[in-house]
Amino acid sequence: MKKILTIFAITALVLSCATAKSNKKDDTVKKTEQPKAEKKVDPQILKLNNVLMSMSDRFKADFKNGDPYEFLADLQKVLDAEKNFRQDDLSLYYLIDKKHNVGETYVPKDLVPLVKNQYYNISRNDLSLRPDVEAALVEMAKGARKDGITLLVSSTYRSYEYQKNLFQKWVRIDGLEEAERESAREGTSQHQLGTAIDFGSIEDSFIETSQGKWLNEHSEEYGWSLSFPQGYEDVTGFRWECWHFRYIGIEACKFQKKWFNDVQQYMMEFIDAWKSYDN
């Protein structure tokens, strides 16, 4: 709780200073004769406080201390960026996890099949992404090529039924408890959104490859965020996946890194709670 209280200690200071200015009178007027100014709390600050207080204890412990007005300005940049996303499909900020899902009929609009091209490689011929996400992949792949790296796309959009069969496969192989750590149930996978990619070998050793190292260092510059970081299984619900990246846009990646300890799940939970607050 200490960090949350500290961030609002700054707000209290701002408010008290403003009140002091409004209360300043001529030196000849006695203090007892001065009317008391009513302190007004910025409703956005109040909303921010309430949303943050609703988050988990671990979220609160990891949340970056700072100026709440700076935080709100950064949040607005993220929400403004969302206005430029296509409006006929789910937002790139859509919260999907073990508690938040999509139905079996959901399919992203205008899925684009991935084909052989000069920017990135594909592992098979049945891959597809949302068109805006595929365009973002091309931009990142161009950046990687400049550094001598060719990205390999191994898994992209998965339908509800595909994910259902995949989860059951891992249950048969590893048992239910282990499958829950490594594979999403149908309707809860980022892959069904058409905005997530598994790169390379899809195994832990990927982080030691040139691709893995490049993505770890540069993906956020292009709007791609690691979904399941190491040491956050209790937060994301899944073990570390160094190969799984979700496109959320450059502003959101900056926001995530600056305030949320670079944990995508924290930021997505916050944005969802912020949007739901007045509803």
Image (cartoon, rainbow, N blue to C red):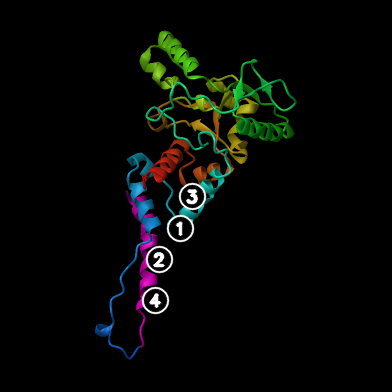
Assess whether residue 7 is covered by the magenta stretch.
Answer: yes
Q: What whole-number distance in Å separates the C-alpha atoms at marks 4 and 3?
A: 29 Å
Q: Position of residue 52 (x, y in %)?
A: 36, 47
Q: What whole-number distance in Å separates the C-alpha atoms at marks 1 and 4?
A: 20 Å
User: At x 38% / y 41%, what residue is drawn?
Assistant: 59
Of all residues, the one furthest to the left in this rendering is: 32
- Quarter of the image for the C terminus: give it: top left
Q: Position of residue 55 (x, y in %)?
A: 35, 42
Q: Position of residue 185 (x, y in %)?
A: 42, 20
Q: Is residue 238 left or right of residue 226?
A: left
Residue 248's place in the image compared with 119, above or below, is: below
Q: Main secondary structure of the magenta part?
A: helix
| Residue designated by label 3 | 75
| Residue designated by label 1 | 69
Report the amino acid beneath label 3. Leu
Does label 1 or label 3 sit earlier along the sequence? Answer: 1
Q: Is residue 8 left or right of residue 156?
A: left
Residue range corresponding to the magenta coloring: 1-26
Q: Position of residue 212 (x, y in %)?
A: 60, 28
| Residue designated by label 2 | 14
Q: What whole-number distance in Å separates the C-alpha atoms at marks 4 and 2?
A: 11 Å
Q: Is residue 170 left or right of residue 80?
A: left
* Image marks 1 and 4: residues in contact by CB distance under 8 Å: no
User: At x 36% / y 72%, what residue is drawn?
Assistant: 19
Does label 4 or label 2 sit earlier along the sequence? Answer: 2
Report the amino acid beneath label 4. Lys
Determine whether the residue tagged by mark 2 lies in a helix, strand or loop.
Answer: helix
Does label 1 or label 4 sit earlier along the sequence? Answer: 4
Residue 21's label in the rendered image is 4
